[in-house]
């Protein structure tokens, strides 16, 4: 029987895709507001430029490397869908039996676009524009595409039974741990602002867009407008809200005052942690996951500071460890009635093996990429550039707020 396109599912996936698409500008605003005003445009540039570069890479080989026919459990056939080959009127039953394959192509493209920019907050102000573009291209080829294939494209981790509903491992562990490698590679910022975030209003706008988009980020993983999408949608809001409040309480006990920045960071931690398990757990379990997310991520951020890692925007603690925690929690909270995966010791051990493999691969390969890129022309910003402000030094531009 030939697959039949369901117009309702197509409409749902269009909305989910747009929601994920808006998250990259949201991330740019979030990061751009957190750094000093004189560096905000450069910070945002690093997110926006990924929209163009990753789109081109996705068309010409990237999508095939992730979702092409499996080669040895490691990578997909790079020629299979190269330049939209054979995709125009195709429905692929493995990736949405009631939507055009092109719809799946676009939905997954939005995930690919946002992943690498997530890491930039960790080593904020320390990489120049040319250096970032080199790192972005190589990192997508050697980290994102292989890892996404291992888990979502039928690679060896998928065959072992490892699951990641919407990117806790594929996106958050890879970006979070790559960011930590960047912190180690570049070392501390040569010039640090003393006034804190440059524009908390921009942070608020960015947070709003990220939370708004995250509902599509997670529920779209169902690839259909059914019960699984509804559960993932609900779990996203529950975990974000619970983590926000728990983080706020912990931060208040720690600092003896309320903080807007701590409040929104807690919400992002909840979203990152629920992402891998959004389609496998019940809403009640999401309450517990939100509590765990706030506690684990908060103290990972504290730990990074005690280690004197200059993770400027707490990327490793929030995204890296949030994604890792949520991925492991599948083995504890997954309910077979939700989406076929059941919590068990066996499932937990598979999840643990997967995060170890992905974490080690990401750390090693990312360090090599930074090293190679730096050897082919320095990718570091200078002290003079950091003092002047990267917007003027690298872009010759400034934000309206700097006038």
Image (cartoon, rainbow, N blue to C red):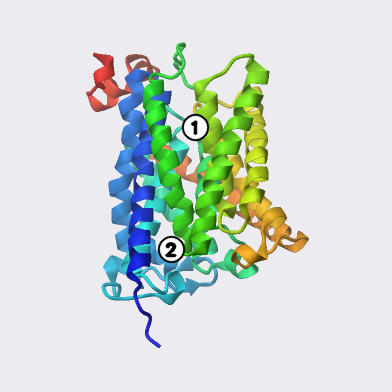
Q: Nearer the viewer, residue 43 or 22?
A: 22
Q: Residue at x 37, y 30 (%)?
A: 205
Q: Position of residue 20 (x, y in %)?
A: 39, 49
Q: Nearer the viewer, residue 132 or 260?
A: 260
Residue extending farthest bottom: 1
Q: Is residue 231 left or right of residue 207?
A: right
Q: Is residue 75 left or right of residue 201?
A: right
Asked if residue 3 can be seen in this view, the reply is yes
Give whichever of discs 2 and 1 has the lower sequence position.
1
Which residue was labeled with disc 1? Answer: 122
Q: Tell me the quarter of the image containing the N terminus.
A: bottom left
Q: Residue at x 42, y 39 (%)?
A: 210
- Relative to residue 25, is residue 61 depicted above or below? below
What label sits on residue 233 in the rendered view?
none
Disc 1 crowd, CA 10 A, few/some/many (<14, 14-19, 20+)? many
Asked if residue 381 can be seen in this view, the reply is no
- Relative to residue 71, is residue 249 depicted above or below? above
Quarter holding residue 47? top left
Q: Position of residue 66 (x, y in %)?
A: 44, 63
Q: Position of residue 332 (x, y in %)?
A: 72, 54
Q: Tell me the quarter of the image containing the C terminus.
A: top left
Q: Secondary structure at mark 2?
A: loop
Q: Are marks 2 and 1 in contact (CB under 8 Å)?
A: no
Residue extending farthest top: 194
Q: Nearer the viewer, residue 73 or 105?
A: 105
Q: Position of residue 362 (x, y in %)?
A: 55, 48
- Relative to residue 87, is residue 323 depicted above or below? above
What label sits on residue 225 in the rendered view?
2
Disc 2 crowd, CA 10 A, few/some/many (<14, 14-19, 20+)? some
Q: Secondary structure at mark 1?
A: loop
Q: Residue at x 50, y 24 (%)?
A: 261
């Amino acid at each position: 029987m030939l697959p039949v396109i369901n117009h309702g599912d197509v409409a749902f996936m269009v909305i989910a895709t747009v929601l994920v698409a808006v998250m990259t500008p949201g991330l740019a605003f979030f990061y751009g507001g957190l750094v000093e005003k004189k560096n905000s445009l450069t910070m945002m540039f690093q997110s926006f430029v990924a929209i163009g570069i990753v789109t081109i890479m996705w068309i010409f080989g990237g999508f095939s490397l992730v979702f092409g026919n499996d080669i040895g459990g490691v990578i997909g056939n790079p020629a299979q869908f190269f330049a939209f080959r054979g995709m125009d009127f195709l429905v692929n039953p493995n990736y949405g039996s009631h939507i055009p394959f092109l719809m799946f192509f676009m939905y997954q493209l939005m995930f690919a676009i946002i992943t690498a920019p997530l890491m930039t907050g960790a080593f904020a102000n320390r990489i120049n524009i040319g250096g970032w573009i080199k790192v972005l291209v190589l990192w997508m080829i050697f980290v994102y595409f292989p890892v996404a294939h291992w888990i979502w494209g039928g690679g060896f981790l998928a065959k072992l039974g490892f699951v990641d509903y919407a990117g806790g491992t594929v996106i958050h562990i890879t970006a979070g741990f790559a960011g930590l490698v960047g912190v180690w590679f570049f070392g501390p910022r040569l010039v640090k602002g003393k006034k804190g975030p440059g524009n908390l209003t921009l942070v608020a706008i960015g947070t709003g867009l990220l939370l708004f988009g995250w509902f599509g980020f997670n529920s779209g993983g169902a690839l259909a407008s059914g019960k699984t999408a509804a559960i993932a949608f609900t779990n996203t809001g529950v975990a974000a809200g619970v983590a926000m409040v728990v983080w706020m309480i912990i931060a208040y006990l720690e600092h003896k005052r309320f903080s807007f920045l701590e409040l929104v960071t807690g919400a992002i931690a909840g979203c990152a942690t629920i992402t891998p398990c959004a389609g496998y757990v019940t809403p009640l379990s999401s309450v517990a996951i939100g509590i765990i997310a706030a506690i684990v991520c908060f103290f990972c951020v504290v730990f990074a500071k005690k280690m004197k890692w200059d993770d400027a925007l707490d990327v490793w603690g929030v995204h890296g460890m949030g994604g890792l925690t949520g991925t492991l929690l599948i083995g504890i909270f997954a309910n077979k009635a939700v989406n076929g995966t059941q919590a068990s010791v066996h499932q937990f051990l598979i999840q643990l093996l997967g995060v170890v493999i992905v974490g080690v691969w990401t750390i090693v390969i990312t360090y090599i990429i930074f090293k190679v890129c730096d050897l082919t022309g320095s990718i570091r910003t200078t002290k003079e550039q950091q003092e002047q402000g990267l917007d003027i030094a690298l872009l010759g531009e400034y934000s309206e707020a700097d006038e």
